[in-house]
Structures are given as structure tokens and as C-alpha cells.
Image (cartoon, rainbow, N blue to C red):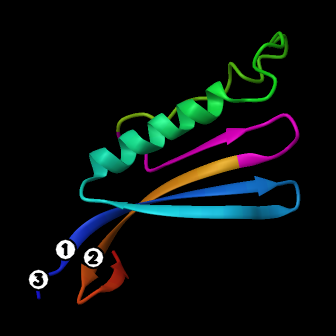
Amino acid sequence: MKAMKVWVLTKQWFDRYGITNENAWAFSSFRLANRTMYEDWTLEYDLRPDKDRPDDDKFWEEQVAPFDLDVESSIMFRDESRIDWHIHECKVENGEENEN
């Protein structure tokens, strides 16, 4: 069986003590994985708990959404929690995943 490339997007939630949750999705192209990372980052940014507070300290202004070629991104929250996204390329052979 010929190996198939997939791009795996992982999303990890951290609180001040460490990782609290993790999800992963596989995509047939880097572009799809990157676009999903961007859309999910934007959703998390829009749902931030203190969205309507003034940003006098530029905390939220300094949060930067992922770009077209980014393989990772993070968003920080004022309570010291954060979310990290990471895309990595894998080969799938005979139902087994092998990282490149």
C-alpha cells in the first residue's frame, strides 16, 4: 500500500498548571489544516471572556493570528491559560501513522 500524507492539527489547552485538554484532526492538505487553525484561533479570540474591556495594556492587540505558512500558533488569556495549535506532516501506511 502506498503511503498517504496527512497534516495533523493538534489543539492543546493549558492552565497555569499544565495541559488540561487536547484534540487532533487530520487533513489532506497543509492549506486545509492551516485554514482550520486560523479559523479556530479567530473563534477563540472572538470568544475571549473580557472582549468588551478596554485594552489599555495592549494585551489583546499583541495576540497575532496565524499566517498562511505558520505551523503553530498560540493565544494567551489574562488568567495565565493559553491554547496552542500545531500542524505536523505525517505519512499513513497500512493504517499506522509515521511522523516525517
Mark 1 element type: strand
Other residues around mark 3 within 10 Å, as few (<14) / some (14–19) / many (≥20): few
Q: With respect to residue 81, does 14 lie above or below? A: below
The three-letter amino acid code for the residue at tag 1 is Met
Other residues around mark 2 within 10 Å, as few (<14) / some (14–19) / many (≥20): some
- Are the residues at dot 2 and dot 1 in contact (C-beta closer than 8 Å)? yes
Mark 2 element type: strand
**Residue 40 position in % (x across, y down):** 52, 40
- The answer to whether 96 appears left or right of 42 in the picture is left
The three-letter amino acid code for the residue at tag 3 is Lys
**Residue 39 position in % (x across, y down):** 46, 35
Gap between marks 1 and 3 measured at Cα: 6 Å
Residue 4's label in the rendered image is 1
Mark 3 element type: loop
Q: Residue furthest left?
A: 2
> Front-most of 75 and 52?
52
Q: With respect to residue 3, does 31 lie above or below? A: above
- The answer to whether 79 appears left or right of 52 in the picture is right
- Are the residues at dot 2 and dot 3 in contact (C-beta closer than 8 Å)? no
Residue 2's label in the rendered image is 3
User: Which residue, given by chain and number where applicable, does mark 2 sit on?
Assistant: 91
Gap between marks 2 and 1 measured at Cα: 5 Å
Q: Is residue 70 magenta?
A: yes
- The answer to whether 72 appears left or right of 32 in the picture is right
Residue visible at 44% across and 50% down? Answer: 71
**Residue 61 position in % (x across, y down):** 68, 18
> Front-most of 47 and 91?
47
Viewport quadrant of the N terminus = bottom left
- Are the residues at dot 1 and dot 3 in contact (C-beta closer than 8 Å)? yes
**Residue 96 position in % (x across, y down):** 33, 87
Mark with earlier residue (2, 3): 3
